[in-house]
Every structure is written in C-alpha cells, then in structure tokens.
Image (cartoon, grey):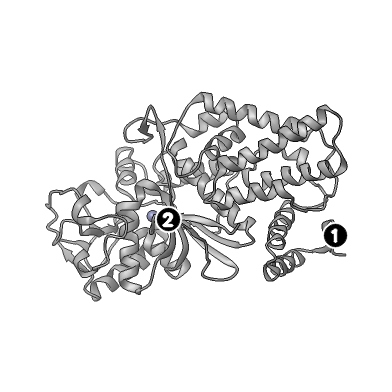
Amino acid sequence: MSLKLYNSLSSKKEIFKSISDKIVKTYGCGPTVYNDPHIGNFRTFVFYDLLNRVLQLNGYETETAVNITDIDDKIIDRVNQENSSLKEITSKYELSFMELSKSLKILPNNHNPRATEYVEEMIEFIQALIDQNLAYEMNGNIFFDIEAYPKYGKFINIKDDLEAEDNELLKRNRNDFTLWKAKKDSDGNIFWESEWGKGRPGWHTECAVMIKMLFDGRLDIHCGGVDLKFPHHENESAQIEALQKHNLSNYWLHAEHLNIDDEKMSKSSGNFIDVNNLIKENGSDVVRLFLLSAHYRTKVSFSQKKLDECKKMIEKINRFAKNFKFVNQSIELKFSYDHNLFIDALNDDLNTPEAIGVFFSFISEMNKKIAKNSINKLDEEKSLVFLKLFNSIFDILDSHNLQDHKIPKNIQNLLISRQKARENQDWKLSDSIRDKILSLGWHVEDTSSGQKPSKKN
Ligand SMILES: [Zn+2]
C-alpha cells in the first residue's frame, strides 16, 4: 500500500506524493525554551520522529527541521524575573530538550534552527511584506493585513470562528497579526534594532522565515500539535504564500493532545507531567511506546496503568526475541505477508495501534509454535526480520538482542527501506538506495532468498 497521510488542508487521507523524487522536506514547530518540556509536548515530538521513520521505511531520504523558539514573551518574562540572560535561560532548556529527545530515541534532525540566529532575515522579510502592501506599521508594531490576502482562512472560517478581541494596538482588522512587536518597558534589555524602532519578531514570522531560509519556503510536510493549526500555522502560511505566491507546504499534519483528567496538559494551567521524572520512573522505552501506542490523531488520557501495560508489552517482546539466537547472525531480509500487514498499517496514516496489533498477533502465533516445539527455520527468519522491522520504527527493544553486529544500524535500516521498494517493484528507488548503501561502503547482492549485504574491501 502506498503511504497515505491525513492532510489538515483537505481534512482527508491523501496518497503522499513528494515534491522531489528522493528527498522529503519536513518542518515541525519545536519547543519554546523557557522551561522543561512536559510529556504532552513530547507526544508531538515523538510523532515527528514516527513520521520521519515511516518516510524512510518508504525509501525516502528526509531533510527534517524542528525549530527552537528562543524569542518569546514567556522567555523574556522569565529572564527579567530571574535577572538572568536570554542565552543562559534558552541554552539550558534547549540542552534539556535535546537530551530528552535523545533518550526517547528521536532521530536527530538535519536542522534545529534558533529564532535568534535569523533576526536580520526576519527584518528583511517583514520589510518585503510592507513593500508589497501586505503589512503596515502602527506605533512601532508591524501587522500583517489579512484584507490584502484574500486566501486567508485555510484552516478556519474566519467569519464564524474568531473571537473578538480588544484592539488597543489599533489594528486595521481585528484578525491582523503581529509580525514585529515594538519594545515594551517590561522587555528590559531584550530587543533588536530595526528601522521601525526597537522590538522583536513575532512567533509566526520566526517559523515562516526559518522555513524560507532552510527550505526556500517550500515544504512537503509541515507538522505540529493540533492547537497550532490556528492561528500559528494559518499565519505562518499566509506570510509565505502572500509573498511567494506558492504553497508553503503540500501536507499539514497535526497531532492531538495528551490529556490529564480530560483536560489538555499545559504548563500554564499547572496541569502537566514532567517527562524527566516519567522516564526515570518508567524507563525511556516504556514512555516512547506509550506515546506511540495511540494513533497520533486521537486524544489520549495519561495514566500510569497504560504505562504499566506498555512495560509488560516490552517484556513480552524481549522474551520472544530471546527465543532466537540472533546475535551476530547475518539475516537475509525478505518480507512476507505479516511484515506487509505491519507496513500497510503504518502507511495508513501512521496507524501505530494497528501495526502493534499485527506484530503481537504474529508473536502469539510464533509462541504457540515454540510451545509445541514446531518452529522451523523459515519461522525463525520471519521472526528476526519482523523484530528488526518493528524496531526500525518503534525503537524500544533491547538492541543487544537484535543487533547484527556485523552490519551497522544505518545500513540495516536502508536494507529494510530497499526491501520495501522491491516489494513495490519500484526498481528505480531500489537502485538509488543500493547506490546509497554502496556509497557507505557496502555491497548488496539480490538472491532468491533476499538481499545479502557484504562489506566492500
Ligand atoms: Zn511554528
């Protein structure tokens, strides 16, 4: 089955088509670095990782960015309250975000741009919007004029859904949004100079400009938490699309919230669970599986019971893996019916609960054979391939059991992607992955029983 993704633009599952043949470009809105992220934030970040891995499983090379929001009102308030410096606060929490990402096995992104590194470009970008009459100045603030961009409102019916707000900033339309915020007394010494006076860029402009600079303002997939759809993503795309006259992104994917007691987890309401403690108490593999065990578009309520269930699931998989003498054993990757069911579930809009279900049915079937002592060589091979395939996405198993020490993990993952391409008879893609494997120092021979990798001399 080809990869299908639920696109918030059409509110439908669509067959994914990339802009370029090989590389898929994705951007996810990242953390605002003024305190430790909570587990609800990480549901979104682990979802970005899932998307990245499923794209790779489909043979795509990915270029990913998750930004670091290091200019924001909440950061500025904290710096001034604590009499600290912007850099001191933001680098501390950026580091904590990076460490937690690593511990939750999130693959590194190609880019983690910081807003502070692009302020000059943001000022130029805002000026270009003013020059095109898409933005205007009012008392040192710059606003985007939504009347100048008739396509405004891709994610919302603005006539019905927007709440009125007071207009002390003297905007022309109540929904005009801020591109540049004039410095307030309470900002202290955190400001940048511009020709409109001292101030700082607005959040919607930060993301828009980082996407413009890294990806020329054109993405395959833009993702984020569902609460960012409006106004943040609406406003990000309005700026780029009004200026560049093309789509900012072909697909928009939004992950649902993690709730506690039926309410959205949030720092500001004091209703949150610290991800650091959760990992310490349960293990990062359990937390990762918990975050992946529900479909990304369903609301999930946090519970220790669910974490305990995930712990039991991991123990069950590890017990199953220990039945086989995998260590140092080279396997030939060939997908069979069960493997394809698993891949089809993931390709159906990243349906992780179904994929996990397919994997556990397979384990139960094999466990019955093990109990009857009727497991054969083919079953063993299928089991090993499945464990590797499962772990290439979920990445929660004791890799010591699974590792083929002769073949590095990146080569193993490329072999899995290439096998998928071959199942789809996509020979062009299969050849390009083989070239990539070759460039990393490995040959692949295609035999009747699957791919046989060997190291180049
Ligand atoms: Zn953003």
Say which residue label 2 marks: 12
Name the image quarter holding the N terminus.
bottom right
Indicate the position of residue 20 as horizontal and vertical percent values.
55, 71
Under mark 2, the amino acid is Lys
Number of marks? 2
Under mark 1, the amino acid is Ser
Q: Quadrant of residue 312?
A: top right
Q: Is residue 1 left or right of residue 185?
A: right
* Mark 1 secondary-structure assignment: loop
Indicate the position of residue 405 as horizontal and vertical percent values.
81, 47
At horizontal 33% and vertical 49% (from top left) the residue drawn is: 72
At horizontal 30% and vertical 38% (from top left) the residue drawn is: 81
Say which residue label 1 marks: 448
Indicate the position of residue 90 as horizontal and vertical percent values.
42, 46
How busy is the neighbourhood of tag 1: few (under 14 within 10 Å), some, or many (20 plus)?
few
Q: Quadrant of residue 369?
A: top right
Decide: is 278 above or below 132: above
How busy is the neighbourhood of tag 2: few (under 14 within 10 Å), some, or many (20 plus)?
few
